[in-house]
Image (cartoon, rainbow, N blue to C red):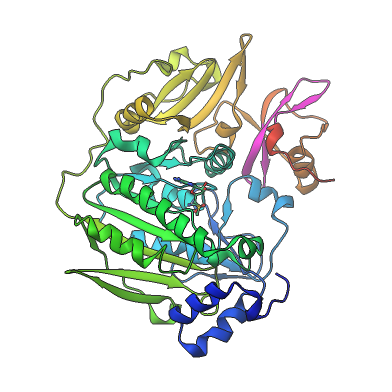
């Protein structure tokens, strides 16, 4: 951001920060807003074990997350496009530490109500692995596209992407072990990353955000099962969008605050908020104390106990537009998929696979919500010809009937730009493009030319 002095920030914002911070911390806080934004990534442990980017330091509250010494050009890194890591600012990865300190059952169903672009959803997806299902919801269409792209890249197949207002979830009352409300907010914690956020800031907008957040919380409280958790977070500092909403939640009288232990050296501001006979614990990340963006988080547990979900119940799937199909109905290259593990679905001419144990929950969600994506898209049949889906290439599903085409860095970039390329001696047919052991997508070798099947809207737009 351009060099700003304290007086250039909105007066009400300065006053509010004066209430939140001890006097000695005000100048370092505003100084920190002039500094460059630290870059960090969280790796996808299903795809890589260590970051390949040089000079990294582990983020202490999140395994798999690392600060980078400088910001590389992610666009020209083929490994970025393989879904092997997500660029996520360090404070947000605190969610990992929170998850590890909750008493969650073996099998879980999570809901991320405000999910785009998908930073926290990909973290939740990794946490769940093959033992749980995530519904990642984003109400805004353009942002939902980005969320879907990031879920596809992550490739775990345990996620359903929906596009609904939080109130549309009312049919899934008390269905989730954990609901995350990473709420749309006034974005004070993003001031140095996005200086436009400073110009858009106003006290009226703070109040508008606070009431929108309460509306989202009203929906969320109904969705958590007894004994389950609700996590509320914002990337803003003010009390209206944070503590006042925490108190609003405690007013529902169905939640207790959860105390998440932290290490003093992490420099996270932890507070105990008393409200009536209840207490809650809040975690604030200030950019002058933590090498990350501003973040606020509080965790709650719903009072009562419920039987843990049983993801292994089986029954037939019923839906007006989504048809369940058998492996023998699939195009031949996919017939090795085991029905016991993966159930197959068809929408129009497109095939999808979803872990069998998630089918009952999927059926419920599909009949109530606007489903944008689920499991792994496998491919489609167009005029009797089978076209494998990009999502399948990036997924962890076996690809035993396909051959690989291993490309070097320059050819991988040509592929990711969706430019034509030719290779001598490549086998014919569908080939998986692979860079350093990671899949980037498909191409088809027709003999006289190679067709590049990288998705048009995802291509790198640079020379
Ligand atoms: N969790 C995301 C991540 O980690 O990448 C960031 C979420 S962002 C802070 C909040 C999201 O809420 C935005 O994508 C925004 O479009 C969405 N949103 C906006 N209005 C909403 C509403 N009324 N209900 C639910 N979500 C809303």
Which residue is drawn at the image coordinates 36% and 39% (left, top)? 167
Foreground residue among 254 and 49: 254
The N terminus lies in quadrant = bottom right
Magenta stretch: helix, strand or loop mostly: strand
User: Number of numbered discs present?
Assistant: 0
Within the magenta stretch, is there residue 437?
Answer: yes
Quadrant that contains the C terminus: top right
Residue extent of the magenta highlight: 432-454
x 28%, y 49%: residue: 221
Question: Does residue 366 appear left or right of residue 90 in this picture?
Answer: left
Residue at point 47% right, 66% down?
295
Rendered view: 161 above or below 60? above
- The residue sitting at 65% across, 50% down in the picture is 79
Residue 72 forms part of the magenta stretch: no
Residue 89 pos. (x, y %): 55, 63
Front residue of this view, candidates 313 and 113: 113
- Res. 63 visible in picture: no
């Amino acid at each position: 951001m351009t060099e700003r002095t304290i007086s250039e920030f909105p007066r009400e914002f300065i006053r509010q920060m004066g209430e939140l911070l001890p006097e000695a911390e005000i100048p370092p806080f505003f100084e920190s807003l002039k500094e460059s934004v630290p870059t960090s990534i969280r790796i996808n442990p299903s795809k890589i074990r260590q970051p390949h980017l040089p000079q990294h330091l582990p983020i202490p509250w999140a395994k798999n997350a690392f600060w980078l010494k400088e910001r590389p050009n992610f666009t020209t890194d083929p490994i970025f496009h393989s879904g092997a890591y997500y660029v996520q600012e360090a404070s947000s990865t605190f969610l990992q530490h929170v998850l590890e300190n909750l008493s969650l059952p073996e099998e879980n169903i999570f809901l991320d109500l405000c999910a785009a672009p998908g930073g926290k959803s990909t973290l939740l997806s990794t946490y769940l692995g093959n033992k749980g299902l995530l519904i990642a919801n984003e109400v805004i269409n353009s942002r939902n596209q980005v969320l879907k792209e990031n879920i596809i890249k992550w490739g775990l197949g345990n996620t359903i992407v929906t596009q609904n207002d939080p109130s549309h979830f009312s049919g899934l009352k008390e269905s989730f072990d954990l609901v995350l409300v990473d709420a749309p907010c006034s974005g004070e914690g993003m001031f140095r990353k996005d200086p436009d956020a400073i110009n858009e800031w106003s006290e009226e907008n703070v109040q508008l955000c606070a009431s929108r957040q309460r509306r989202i919380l009203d929906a969320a409280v109904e969705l958590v099962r007894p004994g389950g958790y609700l996590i509320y977070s914002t990337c803003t500092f003010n009390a209206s969008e944070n503590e006042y909403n925490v108190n609003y939640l405690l007013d529902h009288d169905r939640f207790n605050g959860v105390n998440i232990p932290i290490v003093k050296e992490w420099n996270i501001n932890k507070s105990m908020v008393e409200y009536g006979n209840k207490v809650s614990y809040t975690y604030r990340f200030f950019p002058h104390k933590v090498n990350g963006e501003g973040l606020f988080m509080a965790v709650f547990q719903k009072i009562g106990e419920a039987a843990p979900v049983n993801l292994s119940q089986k029954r037939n799937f019923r839906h007006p537009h989504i048809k369940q199909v058998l492996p023998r109905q699939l195009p031949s290259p996919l017939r090795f998929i085991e029905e016991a593990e993966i159930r197959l679905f068809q929408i129009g001419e497109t095939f999808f696979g979803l872990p069998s144990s998630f089918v009952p929950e999927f059926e419920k969600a599909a009949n109530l919500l606007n489903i944008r994506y689920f499991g792994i898209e496998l491919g489609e049949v167009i005029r009797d010809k089978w076209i494998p889906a990009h999502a399948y290439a990036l997924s962890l599903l076996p690809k035993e009937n396909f051959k690989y085409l291993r490309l070097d860095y320059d050819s991988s970039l040509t592929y990711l730009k969706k430019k034509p390329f030719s290779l001598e001696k490549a086998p014919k047919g569908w080939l998986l493009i692979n860079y350093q052991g990671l899949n980037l997508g498909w191409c088809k070798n027709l003999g006289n030319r190679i067709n590049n099947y990288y998705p048009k809207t995802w291509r790198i737009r640079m020379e």
